[in-house]
Amino acid sequence: MTYLGLDDEEFIRGKVPMTKQEIRILTLVKARIKPDSIIYDIGAGTGSLSVEAARLAPQGRVYALEKNPEGVRLIRANAANFALKNISVLEKEAPDGLDGLPSCDTVLIGGSSGSMEQILDEVKAKLKTGGRIVVNCITVQSLLQAIDYFRSHEAEFRYEAIQVMVTRLQQIGPYDMAKAVNPVYILTAQKWDRDAASYADMSEKAV
Amino acid sequence: MTYLGLDDEEFIRGKVPMTKQEIRILTLVKARIKPDSIIYDIGAGTGSLSVEAARLAPQGRVYALEKNPEGVRLIRANAANFALKNISVLEKEAPDGLDGLPSCDTVLIGGSSGSMEQILDEVKAKLKTGGRIVVNCITVQSLLQAIDYFRSHEAEFRYEAIQVMVTRLQQIGPYDMAKAVNPVYILTAQKWDRDAASYADMSEKAV
Amino acid sequence: MTYLGLDDEEFIRGKVPMTKQEIRILTLVKARIKPDSIIYDIGAGTGSLSVEAARLAPQGRVYALEKNPEGVRLIRANAANFALKNISVLEKEAPDGLDGLPSCDTVLIGGSSGSMEQILDEVKAKLKTGGRIVVNCITVQSLLQAIDYFRSHEAEFRYEAIQVMVTRLQQIGPYDMAKAVNPVYILTAQKWDRDAASYADMSEKAV
Amino acid sequence: MTYLGLDDEEFIRGKVPMTKQEIRILTLVKARIKPDSIIYDIGAGTGSLSVEAARLAPQGRVYALEKNPEGVRLIRANAANFALKNISVLEKEAPDGLDGLPSCDTVLIGGSSGSMEQILDEVKAKLKTGGRIVVNCITVQSLLQAIDYFRSHEAEFRYEAIQVMVTRLQQIGPYDMAKAVNPVYILTAQKWDRDAASYADMSEKAV
């Protein structure tokens, strides 16, 4: 059985920053990936999210967009290392590259290079109703661009945002020493039909 | 399909503190639950972890131990609300109640009422090799009791510990306002065979 | 001798949110108040910052602006409780009320009700060169409004911004339990003369 | 006028870890240093706390104990750089070196190398009633050793403990990017006379 929550050490890394394990876990769980989901990973970086998403959706596919050639190389190497055949890597800077893709169930956004609004406009057109967008932000500016977008599209999206700060306790001899991991904002938006009668996806209680 | 990461609002709550969504997600993912896992939830509180664990292990079973009668009532109500038939609730204060249980794959510890060492001794005997114990600590004392236990049993366990601090951005009119959730330490220990030749569970890379 | 860092319990409180001790300490130290400083406390709330600032500047004066009548009442009560004669309270919503005030050395901004830019424009005209503005933000929007202002006035201001998250360990019987305090962003801007030959204020090293 | 809260960049640094600015500020304010205070800085490291404490107590003196020769060298260099004549540096591993020192008003503990209890025993004998001990902990073990000491000496000490997590927003081009600083626990203990009639030091309200 494949597991979510691979150790950071299992990925081939380079100079490209990599999303850390706990952030990957929270991002992918809030994304609500199904075994046949079509997923975009925009600003895929090292490919750690793409790899874990592809493993959660064996009958689906991940389209990883990354503008940095070293990142593209790392994503392909990590996909091969896990024998994954369901990741397509595009060396593109979003929103370029999005319009040729099939409709999707889930969008992960790790980097937007200042084009957050244009990326979200393209994604909005491609995302199925009920689908989710999960944005990871490490700058205040990108966080507010994402918040502003969903606030001004409240007929089509609702969102939640959290900040996650993880501190690892590093075992140094007899001591456990606190080492901080850079905090990340995780914004989760769901494309909804505000006028629809029910939200089947919202409630998991027994019918 | 059932999802991990139910909203906190979907649970019936009382005066018993409830583990928050992001902590449940990280706890259950680090626990590496399989569809047929036998799981103990010690100090189960409201039952939010029991419910999510039971949903991840439909062919398995959760044994929830809770000493507080109101907690026991809430766990049963939440299990019924999600039509779950694979949660057994025991009104016991661990380590009482553990010795009659079958061997387990996973142990979640949310409360130890000062008996961390005795609980871990009982659990160690019941936990299958390769199995995991995930402890949530909100006091410094319980964190160090757990760390001390695994450090003094390093032939049988290895562990990692993190502190997770989540801040929710509450939408108040046009503003997103930071509201902190109390930090939790999550300690994950794996029962290993230090002399074994390989760690199949450790690495998920393609063989 | 009067001390910085009064306990939160020493203030008279109401329904108005109060800046917590560690945030007051960091805010007032980064403000570099002198014994004769003229200080504005904009959005003074309960008056906890005004009181501590007034105690640091016995030959100076604090002008506290607060739009909420209950806040005004609390500021006056707290000032009287500490026998402080150097706090003037104005029941005004900034930027109203600023233009009649004398030039200042220090500005503390705790609330801006969406008028951050207008407030900073008024303050910029009143602040002596070398003076400091310290803004406490609890919403993402106010943080970015402040950042945007200083970035677009980089000929006149340089700034730093931090986020501070304090967790108190509450002593409950034999345990020390983690209780989070809502995080606050503290943005400190200094009005400088970019073309000036030296920054006497910058370096405290012996000449 | 000398200020508290020197920038980290103003210190000469080496391979010895240095206490960061916001932690120094909170530590020194909670220590309640007076202009004539006698201060011990135990495990003084780079000397950043010693320097700021010496500046706050120009008629007092700082006794800095540090076991690492490079640390001793850095403390002396930093003291000279700020033309401070009131810092005595002892190349000692506490509790060695303490017994020859005069009574003190304030003790700062940055490192204890596992000897927390012995250090606190020596310090307790030397600390004047009403004096304060402020301990900075980066390991779980040292935090609990300090907590255990004050809990078992509750007739002579009361304490508070907080954890402080600072994130700096680094300005990278048009972005402000979150960079975490390792969290530190700050434990402040006051030597009190539980049977005394009043706590003049406790309350700063007007009499």
Image (cartoon, coloured by chain):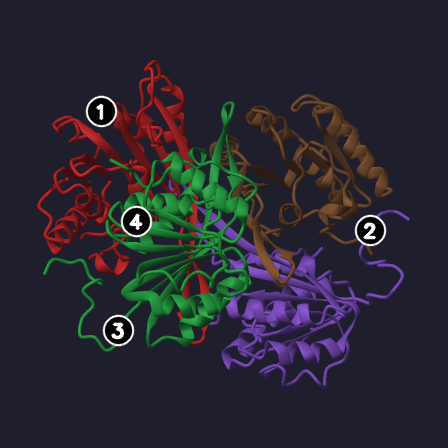
Chain colours: A green, B red, C purple, D brown
Residue C203, position as x, y percentages in the image: 82, 52
Position above or below: C90 against D7:
below
Chain bearing mark 3: A
On the picture, is D111 further left or further right than B109?
Answer: right
- Residue type, numbered disc 4: Thr
Q: Quadrant of the C terminus of chain A?
A: bottom left
The numbered mark at residue D152 is none
- Residue type, numbered disc 2: Glu
Residue with the mark numbered 4: B19
Residue with the mark numbered 3: A193
Q: Secondary structure at mark 2?
A: loop
Chain bearing mark 2: C
Graded by Cα atoms within 10 Å as few (under 14), some (14 to 19) or many (20 or more), the crowding at tag 2 reads some
Residue with the mark numbered 1: B128
Q: Residue at x 58, y 45 (%)?
A: D181
CB under 8 Å between discs 3 and 4: no
The numbered mark at residue C204 is 2
On the picture, is B54 further left or further right than C166?
Answer: left
